[in-house]
Image: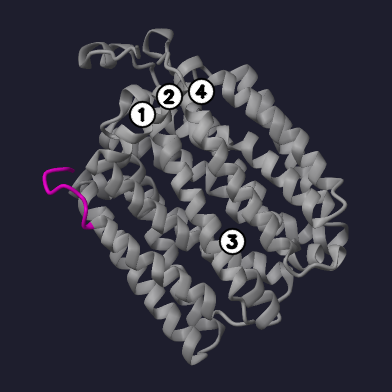
Amino acid sequence: MSRAPTACSTVIARPVVSNRLPLLLGFLIAIGPVSVDMYLPAFPAIAHDFRDAAAPGLTLAAYFAGLALGQMTQGPFSDRVGRRLPVLLGLSLYTVASLGCALAWSTASLSAFRLLAAFGGSASVVIPRAMVRDVADGPAAAMLFSKLMLVMGVAPIVAPILGSAVVSVGSWRWIFGLAALYGVIALALVWFNLPDTLPAARRSLIGFRSILIRYGQIAAERSFLAHALTGTFAIGALFAYLAGTPGVFIGDFGWSPPAYAALFAANAAVYIGFNQWNPHLVARVGLRPVITASIVLLLIGTAGLTISAVVGTGAAAIIGCLFICQASYGFALPSTMVAALSRHQPHAGSASALMGTWQYLGGAITGAVVGGFADGTARPMAMAMLGCAILALLAGALRPATVL
């Protein structure tokens, strides 16, 4: 039987949030953009070295698949044994597998090591979200999410710039050496500074069959389903952007890797700005209107992007539409996360894992679609992003009228 604390005991049992916790959780979650964004400028070099044009897309899809698989297991594991141990184990695997990526000899071996690195790194993606739910709820959780997203948001700005610099002076393999170093630093920070936010009295002792039943119960809850799917389709559009922009700007428009990295950093800055505005807006008008606004922005941005790609208006119009999409992510990602987890405090790890799994499966699918239909233009990326925006609109319509 799982241990379900009463509402009163839940409030009492919540740990006090230290000023360092958002910084540390943000550093852990940043393992995602560090692992993806830093090697985007190296896509042409990887394809050239392996004599395989599909290599970059396959390794990216393998990473997303590893994140999806890892989150399905890491979340329930952290509900059972606490938050700290799974993070330490996951970071150890991530570090070793990143070194394997640096030594990879083929597309298959790099994809396999990327999958293993993602499986380990998934603990640092899913568990910090559950830790936020352990210590806060509602507007307070939204504020905490935005604080750690501010820390995490530095990574999408710095990572591609660092990656392009590495490719300019040396081998793409050095990028994965830097990723391994990041894992070592994260391990040290967790070992010496991260408390366990899930006390033993609130841990859930359930078996595999019960975990599957729990996932079914969480997915059947209408508020979770609506908000998790909205966030999933928003993430799908974001991953289509990640998969498509290197080919569009470096390949089609002939930009240099540093120029592409600068554009990527500018997009990340837009995301960070709207992400930091998000908690203040949520406190003023509530989660529901903010999520609705994020869907509208995503529709506007992706529709404009599709028109620009089909008509062939050039890089400037595409960049402007991508900025609008980034603004929508700044609202959608933290808000849908808080809304989806709001009714699942006793098993926040499982709920966070299920949501994360859906998101990364969506990312793997949209990435594969963009790669499979690549034609040297922005059209496949734009159409995939527009499709995700339409699906996000339909998912948003599922939200209960009385919630948030």
- Where, quadrant-wise, is the N terminus in this rendering? top left
Residue 237 is situated, as x and y percent measured from the top left of the image, at: 46, 63
Mark 3 vs mark 2: in front: 2
- Assess disc 2: are there few (<14), some (14-19) or many (≥20) residues with their C-alpha within 10 Å of its C-alpha: few
Residue topped by disc 2: 209
* Residue at the far top in the pictured view: 201
Q: Earlier in the sequence, mark 1 or mark 4?
A: 4
How far apart are the alpha carbons under marks 4 and 3? 35 Å
The span shown in magenta is 397-404
The rendered magenta stretch, by its main secondary structure, is classed as loop
Q: Earlier in the sequence, mark 2 or mark 4?
A: 4
Decide: is 83 above or below 268.
Answer: above
Amino acid identity at mark 4: Phe
Decide: is 231 above or below 304.
Answer: above
Residue topped by disc 3: 265
Residue 28 is situated, as x and y percent measured from the top left of the image, at: 57, 35
Which label number is shown at residue 77?
4
Q: Nearer the viewer, residue 103 or 250?
A: 103
**What SS does tag 3 mark?**
helix
Q: Does the CB distance between marks 1 and 2 fall below 8 Å?
A: yes
Residue topped by disc 1: 213
Amino acid identity at mark 2: Arg
Q: Earlier in the sequence, mark 4 or mark 3?
A: 4
